Image (cartoon, rainbow, N blue to C red):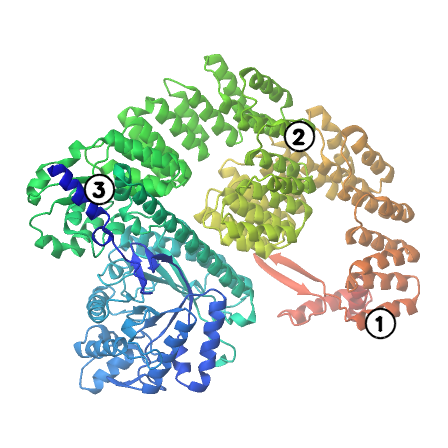
């Protein structure tokens, strides 16, 4: 009977929301914080906003208030939600406070209007209460006021120490917070339009670098503000400089010591969220642009990480910007900086991190020239930066909507559980109680279940039985509710343990309650089963909530939740949980859990953690476990440490199919395809049966090697074993045939597939792209969407690569916009593909913007951007990024070094090329195929053909790339016999020439004037090697005919070539016409060129020179007159020379060089010896140009 009564009372309590739920979404429109997030009316809130310090100042003049309204209206139209502005103006011109405690009502009415207008446009305000600087008074004004009252003060920093000054400041705070708004009829402290108060703009106390002065001042003033106003949030106004509490982090500061401490200052009770300011262009003005951006990345990453792990508070990037007054400024640089900041915020918000918004400096409206400081943004000017800002607003709003929808789903689940009733409904109801607190994914802890209306018994149970994530969690709970615990002496009938799962009926004291040791009675099997089901169904959020409040957790519980995070690709959270498990008392590690942690290390790219686990495996003896050993070698393989992976594999006493598959996978993914096939053979000999996964990865090796016969043999095995119907095996087979040139086989397999998943479609699209059938790739992508299959990041990467091949920038931009909208733009494969696409379409700045906006970068990302700059002719940027990669990125690969060696060749900077050669020798890359060919190219282009020969002859393995590079080198130097002999040796060493090889061969024939031999090789391409001539081959043949004076044949070949005739082809013919003096053909060529580009100066000048050479002065004059009419100007030629590390550049016609007199004096001397004047020499050079 007592049991039934207890259960009846329990149900009554359960369905009484007021007793058991915590309501923070009261709908009062105040912004709140909950752990590391902002919330507004129970929903996540993100602050994408701006600084506008001038709002009150301008609004104090009623005639200027439309400018304030315009600024708010334009901000709202771009999705901005927060404005930070001054609520101070102390002394001086147009003051708010003209003496301590004496206020200018007109200025206050200006601030009233600002708040009312912000409310109208639904923009929240952060109001700063004082300034560190003299602008608008600042702390200096307060100190001067105290001095005028007889206070002996020696420094402006006495603002933080002197009691009289502090009294002035406190009075100002009280006056502002209690201000009655003449427009809204509300006191400031009751107005939810105000999001937060700021103690001071950028407080600094350089006279006390220890930080104690600022720390004491913030503690005192935070307490004062909260004693007046508990509705609003409070922040200190800090810039983010690290201090004495974390001396190891002070190296991140930009060489400034200002007496603040980001960690200690923000840990003060009453400070609700942290702030950070970012001005690398000011702080590091003497550094390069790339170094400044590198600093910005590190600066933001460190503060966001510390806000999540140490402070456990939201962080607002409260000031950032880029000044147009910086030397060499362009809008792209500003957009680049904004994108870096916004991507950090977006990525953090998307994953539940603490970065909750950013406020750029500063917003202006039109007609405010006097407020321009270089950083201003005027949204109505529709700059590219305005688009970047609006895009960020949209992205953050999408995240908010997703979280809100998830919260509504949780509410629906609770309502459904309530309707069902019974014990099942009771369990669900109890389990979902804390869902009243919406928690975005990626951030969990006890903060979500601690609130003002939690019963005392619940709180005590939490303290007794919950497993706290950190000691700060326990301290936080103890601090917040200490007064409740002191009053607690007995517990009522119902006590919740962990707030969710276990219910106990009792009437005893707390001590006897503890003695019952309830957790021992828990059925861990059932709890773990329920936890496993939640993880298995993909509801990781609910699974984590259940895990956090389980009164007892064993090794199985920890393993289930950690593996869930690994499967969800949330490796950082998985490692964080594993670390907590490691230090949890009463738990022991097992090989299976360690193998999951190693998988997380591989996903997180955390090699150091993985190596520590390796050491533990050896020490504990778990290294002999199949689970742990296989995971360890898989981790090393994914890090590219294939030698260590092989060593681990060789030392394993028992090798299962998992182990064999792991080592083969590592070898194949690392590019060791042949060795992967060797290990497959060893696997067969060892008697271990391979599975479908093994065969799928081996098929990939066959595809990359072009090993068609071996692939067919594997195909036979898949049919025998019944694996060919498995989707991933079928996909691998299709890819293998496609890459081996048997596209019809691949398409046939694709058509026979019962189910075509995203991998199948991606495989066929990728194949089309690799075979340069880009149109078919785009069509396949369209059919994929029509079939209802959603593309993934790899699909988009392949399609974007197809746009690169077609050089269709409009399609690429549309795809870029789409992946931005669905959140895939920051994935490595998509971002790398976007960089390549923009580069091939000539949009170097867009490619760079993608790179600098990436939240993380791999070796492909770095190598791609270096190649982008190299191929785009930006040699200096390529060198800078290689240096940056060596300092802060992954280890540079052969692709990165090859790109920079190409720069050395193109710019003929031999010394730097030699230094790079020495470096690749020191790190053992000299035998890599790309490095060898790049070195041969570099030395050839720098005129050192003998050095190129030496590199070529020292190559240990013959490959067509290096061989082709040597052929091209000989061709460029006019060594026709060496070129032909080297080509003839190809077949003797077992190499087959490719299309690039023939370009070098045809170039050599062209330079030597061997037209007939050139035609022989041109025909040989298709007849013997089945290579279809490309536009480049036709270009070589046209150049060959032009050099041989066979202009009629050249023109006929141009007309018959199966490609679009571009300006390069016609320019070649036009130059030949000038040399041969063929006016008629020259006129036709010029006509075609002017149709393509009517304002090309080179075409006009060459045609005029053709006329002049034939004595047709009237026609030549007509061409010059046409140039003047069109406004076509000949771009002056220039040249440069490097002497002793000093580069000197010279422009044609320019005489203002420092050594101009000496240069032209020497020219006079030379001219006198050849009986020609300097003026005549200049005229001749102009004519020849």
Q: CA distance from mark 2 to mark 3?
A: 56 Å
Q: Is residue 386 above or below residue 185?
A: above
Q: CA distance from mark 2 to mark 1?
A: 60 Å
* Quadrant housing the C terminus: bottom right
**Residue that badge 1 annotates:** 1121
**Residue that badge 2 annotates:** 747
Percent x, y of residue 129: 30, 74
**Res 271 → quadrant:** bottom left
Q: Is residue 569 above or below residue 198?
A: above
Q: CA distance from mark 3 to mark 1?
A: 87 Å
Mark nearer the viewer, 2 or 1: 2
Q: Is residue 1142 above or below residue 835?
A: below
Left or right side of 688 for 770: right
**Residue that badge 3 annotates:** 467
Q: Decide: marks 3, 1 in contact (CB < 8 A)?
A: no
Q: Decide: marks 2, 3 in contact (CB < 8 A)?
A: no
Percent x, y of residue 453: 20, 55
Percent x, y of residue 330: 55, 65
> Which of 365 and 953 lies nearest the eye of the viewer?
365
Mark nearer the viewer, 3 or 1: 3
| Circle 3 residues within 10 Å: few <14, some 14–19, many ≥20 | many
Residue at 25% across / 74% down in the picture? 157
> Which of 1090 and 417 lies nearest the eye of the viewer?
417
């Amino acid at each position: 009977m007592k049991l039934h009564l207890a259960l009846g009372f329990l149900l009554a309590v359960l369905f009484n929301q007021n007793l058991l739920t915590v309501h923070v979404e009261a709908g009062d429109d105040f912004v709140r914080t909950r752990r590391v997030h902002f919330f507004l009316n129970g929903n996540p809130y993100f602050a994408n906003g701006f600084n506008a310090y001038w709002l009150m100042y301008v609004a104090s003049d009623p005639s200027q208030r439309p400018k304030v309204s315009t600024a708010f209206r334009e901000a709202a139209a771009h999705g901005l939600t927060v404005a930070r502005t001054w609520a101070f103006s102390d002394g001086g011109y147009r003051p708010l406070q003209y003496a301590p405690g004496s206020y200018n009502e007109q200025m206050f009415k200006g601030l009233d209007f600002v708040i009312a207008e912000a409310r109208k446009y639904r923009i929240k305000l952060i109001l700063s209460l004082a300034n560190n600087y003299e602008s608008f008074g600042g702390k200096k004004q307060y100190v001067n006021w105290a001095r005028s009252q007889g206070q002996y003060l020696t420094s402006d920093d006495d603002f933080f120490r002197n009691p009289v000054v502090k009294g002035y400041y406190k009075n100002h705070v009280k006056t502002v917070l209690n201000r009655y708004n003449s427009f809204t009829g509300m006191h400031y402290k009751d107005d939810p339009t105000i999001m937060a108060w700021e103690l001071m703009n950028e407080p600094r106390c350089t006279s006390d670098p220890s930080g104690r002065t600022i720390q004491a001042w913030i503690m005192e003033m935070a307490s004062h503000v909260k004693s007046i106003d508990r509705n609003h949030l409070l922040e200190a106004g800090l810039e983010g400089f690290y201090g004495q509490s974390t001396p190891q982090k002070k190296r991140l500061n930009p060489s400034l010591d200002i007496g603040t401490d980001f960690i200690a200052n923000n840990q003060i009770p009453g400070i609700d969220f942290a702030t950070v300011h970012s001005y690398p262009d000011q702080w590091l003005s003497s550094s390069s642009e790339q170094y400044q951006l590198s600093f910005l990345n590190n600066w933001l990453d460190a503060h966001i990480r510390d806000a999540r792990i140490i402070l456990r508070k939201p962080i607002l990037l409260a000031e950032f910007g880029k000044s147009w007054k910086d030397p060499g400024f362009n809008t792209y640089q500003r957009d680049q900086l904004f994108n870096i900041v916004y991507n950090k915020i977006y990525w953090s918000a998307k994953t539940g991190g603490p970065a909750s918004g950013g406020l750029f400096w500063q917003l202006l409206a039109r007609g405010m020239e006097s407020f321009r400081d270089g950083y201003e943004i005027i949204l109505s000017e529709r700059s590219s930066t305005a688009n970047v800002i609006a895009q960020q607003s949209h992205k953050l709003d999408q995240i908010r909507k997703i979280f809100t929808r998830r919260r509504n789903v949780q509410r629906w689940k609770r309502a459904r559980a309530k309707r069902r009733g019974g014990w099942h409904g009771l369990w669900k109801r109890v389990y979902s109680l804390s869902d009243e607190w919406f928690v975005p994914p990626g951030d969990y802890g006890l903060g979500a279940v601690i609130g003002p209306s939690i019963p005392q018994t619940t709180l005590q149970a939490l303290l007794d039985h919950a497993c706290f994530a950190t000691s700060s969690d326990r301290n936080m709970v103890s601090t917040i509710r200490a007064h409740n615990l002191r009053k607690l002496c007995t517990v009522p009938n119902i006590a919740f343990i962990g707030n969710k799962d276990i219910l106990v009926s009792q009437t005893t004291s707390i001590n006897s309650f503890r003695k019952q040791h309830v957790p021992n009675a828990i059925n861990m099997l059932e709890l773990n089963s329920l936890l496993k089901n939640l993880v298995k169904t993909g509801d990781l959020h609910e699974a984590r909530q259940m895990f956090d409040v389980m009164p007892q957790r064993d090794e199985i519980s920890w393993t289930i939740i950690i593996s869930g995070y690994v499967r969800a690709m949330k490796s950082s959270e998985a490692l964080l949980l594993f670390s907590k498990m490691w230090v949890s008392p009463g738990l022991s590690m097992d090989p299976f859990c360690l193998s999951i942690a190693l998988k997380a290390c591989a996903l997180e790219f955390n090699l150091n953690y993985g190596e520590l686990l390796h050491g533990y495996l050896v020490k504990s003896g778990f290294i002999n476990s199949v689970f742990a050993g296989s995971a360890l070698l898989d981790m090393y393989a994914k890090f590219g440490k294939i030698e260590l992976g092989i060593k681990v594999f060789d030392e394993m006493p028992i090798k299962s199919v998992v182990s064999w598959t792991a080592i083969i996978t590592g070898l194949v993914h690392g590019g060791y395809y042949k060795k992967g096939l060797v290990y497959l053979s060893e696997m067969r000999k060892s008697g271990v049966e391979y599975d479908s996964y093994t065969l799928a990865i081996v098929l990939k090796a066959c595809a990359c090697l072009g090993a068609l016969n071996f692939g067919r043999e594997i195909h036979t095995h898949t049919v025998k074993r019944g694996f060919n119907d498995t989707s991933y095996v079928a996909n691998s087979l299709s890819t293998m045939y496609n890459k081996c040139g048997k596209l019809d086989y691949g398409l046939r397999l694709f058509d026979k597939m019962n189910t075509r998943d995203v991998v199948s479609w991606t495989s066929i699209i990728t194949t089309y792209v690799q075979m340069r059938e880009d149109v078919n790739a785009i069509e396949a992508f369209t059919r994929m969407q029509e079939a209802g299959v959603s593309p993934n990041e790899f699909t988009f990467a392949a399609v974007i690569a197809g746009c690169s091949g077609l050089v269709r920038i409009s399609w690429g931009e549309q795809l870029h916009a789409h992946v931005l909208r669905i959140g895939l733009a920051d994935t490595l494969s998509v971002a790398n593909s976007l960089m390549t696409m923009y580069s091939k379409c000539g949009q170097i700045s867009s490619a760079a913007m993608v790179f600098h906006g990436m939240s993380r970068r791999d070796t492909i990302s770095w190598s791609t951007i270096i190649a982008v700059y190299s191929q785009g002719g930006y040699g200096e940027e390529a060198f800078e990024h290689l240096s940056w990669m060596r300092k802060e990125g992954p280890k540079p690969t052969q692709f990165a070094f090859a790109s920079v060696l190409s720069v050395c060749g193109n710019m003929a900077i031999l010394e730097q090329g030699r230094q790079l050669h020495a470096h690749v020798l020191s790190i053992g890359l000299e035998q890599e195929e790309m490095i060898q060919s790049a070195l041969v190219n570099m030395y050839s282009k720098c005129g050192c053909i003998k050095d190129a020969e030496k590199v070529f002859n020292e190559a240990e393995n013959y490959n067509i790339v290096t061989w082709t590079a040597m052929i091209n080198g000989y061709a460029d130097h006019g060594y026709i016999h060496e070129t032909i002999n080297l080509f003839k040796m190809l077949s003797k060493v077992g190499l087959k020439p490719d299309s690039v090889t023939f370009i070098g061969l045809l170039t050599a024939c062209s330079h030597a004037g061997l037209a007939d031999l050139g035609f022989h090789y041109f025909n040989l391409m298709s007849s013997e090697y089945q290579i279809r001539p490309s536009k480049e081959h036709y270009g070589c043949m046209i150049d060959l005919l032009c050099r041989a004076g066979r202009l009629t044949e050249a023109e006929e070949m141009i007309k018959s070539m199966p490609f679009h005739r571009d300006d390069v082809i016609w320019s070649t013919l036009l130059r030949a016409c000038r040399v041969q003096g063929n006016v008629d053909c020259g006129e036709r060529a010029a006509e075609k060129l002017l149709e393509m580009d009517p304002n090309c100066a080179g075409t006009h000048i060459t045609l005029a020179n053709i006329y002049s050479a034939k004595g047709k002065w009237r026609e030549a004059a007509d061409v010059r007159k046409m140039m003047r009419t069109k406004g076509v100007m000949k771009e002056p030629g220039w040249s440069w020379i490097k002497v002793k590390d000093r580069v000197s550049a010279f422009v044609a016609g320019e005489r203002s060089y420092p050594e101009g007199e000496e240069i032209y004096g020497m020219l006079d001397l030379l001219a006198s010896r050849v009986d020609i004047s300097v003026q005549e020499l200049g005229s001749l050079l102009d004519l020849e140009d």
